[in-house]
């Protein structure tokens, strides 16, 4: 391969990387404003309010794995994160895997922290508002 051609390929590679990076936010957590997990089946309640990015900024949560956790042998692994996976990938409603079915997994995670901090909604209607 000629030097010029190689440089062209590298140049194109860099350009594609930059473009991919620029387009990424469109598919990231920044767009989440509420949660309606289809894995839960037919809904009983309106979607849960959760403006992902804004919420985590206001609540001053630094680590992604506070929510996107990874466990091994029952212990949380501190420096690993599962942000590429949905909660339902592990918390299966049918088998109740790991030990917590999906709806309980959500409620436990969200409410425990709000109760602990004495901040953030804890009643049904605050998280699942009508409208
Ligand atoms: C801190 C926020 C929070 C509170 C408080 C809360 N929920 Fe939820 N709830 C969620 C999240 C998050 C989900 C999963 C995302 C979704 O809505 O699909 C969920 C899911 C559900 C679901 C399964 C989806 C559906 O609509 O069938 C039901 C039922 C539900 N909640 C009922 C309740 C009831 C009843 C209460 C009060 C006793 C309550 N929730 C309180 C956040 C909350
Ligand atoms: C307070 C809890 C919480 C924290 C902290 C958090 N997330 Fe999330 N994130 C969620 C929930 C809940 C979902 C929805 C999961 C689902 O649908 O199964 C989600 C979804 C996502 C998704 C999937 C987006 C999509 O469109 O499907 C990505 C990517 C993500 N989060 C990245 C991050 C990153 C990166 C961080 C750290 C900077 C982070 N999250 C911190 C709760 C959190
Ligand atoms: C990679 C698999 C995996 C993913 C993804 C995952 N979990 Fe878990 N989760 C586990 C395992 C394993 C445990 C430990 C066993 C148990 O308590 O059920 C656990 C424990 C929990 C617990 C109890 C401990 C705690 O931290 O309070 C809650 C609540 C929970 N998960 C909620 C969630 C929510 C909500 C999501 C999505 C944001 C999620 N999990 C994503 C595997 C996962
Ligand atoms: C690790 C702690 C933590 C977890 C986990 C957490 N929250 Fe919060 N949340 C907070 C704190 C702290 C506030 C109050 C922020 C403030 O206004 O200062 C808050 C506020 C909120 C509010 C009020 C509006 C807002 O965005 O500030 C909503 C709605 C909310 N949380 C929903 C959720 C849902 C749904 C989940 C689960 C998917 C969740 N939270 C998980 C800490 C947490």
Image (cartoon, helix red, strand yellow):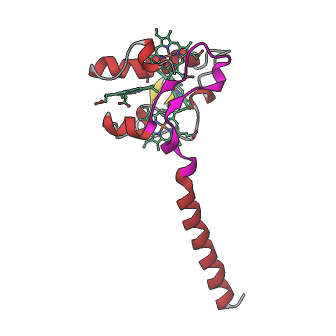
Answer yes or no: is residue 73 visible: no
The image shows residue 131, relative to residue 25, as above or below, that is: above
Task: Write the start and end of the magenta stretch as one range.
Answer: 26-52
> Is 77 inside the magenta-drawn segment?
no
**Residue found at x 38% / y 15%:** 122
Is residue 103 left or right of 61 when viewed as pictured? Answer: right
Is residue 50 left or right of 40 when viewed as pictured? Answer: left
In-front residue for pair 77/11: 11
Is residue 27 left or right of 51 when viewed as pictured? Answer: right
- Based on the displayed image, in which of its 4 quarters is residue 53 positioned? top left
> Is 47 inside the magenta-drawn segment?
yes
For the view shown, which residue lies furthest in the right direction?
A: 1
**Residue found at x 65% / y 24%:** 39
What number of labels is visible?
0
- Based on the displayed image, in which of its 4 quarters is residue 116 positioned? top left
Across and down, in percent, residue 102 comes to 57, 19
């Amino acid at each position: 391969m000629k030097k010029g051609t190689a440089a062209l390929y590298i140049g194109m590679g860099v350009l594609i990387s930059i473009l991919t990076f620029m387009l990424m936010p469109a598919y990231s957590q920044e767009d989440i404003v509420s949660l309606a997990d289809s894995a839960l089946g037919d809904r009983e309640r309106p979607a849960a309010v959760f403006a992902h990015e804004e919420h985590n900024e206001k609540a001053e949560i630094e680590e992604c794995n506070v929510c996107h956790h990874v466990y091994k042998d029952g212990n949380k692994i501190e420096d690993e994160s599962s942000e590429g996976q949905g909660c339902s990938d592990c918390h299966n409603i049918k088998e109740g895997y790991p030990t917590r079915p999906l709806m309980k997994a959500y409620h436990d995670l969200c409410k425990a922290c709000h109760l602990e901090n004495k901040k953030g909604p804890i009643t049904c209607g605050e998280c699942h508002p009508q409208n």
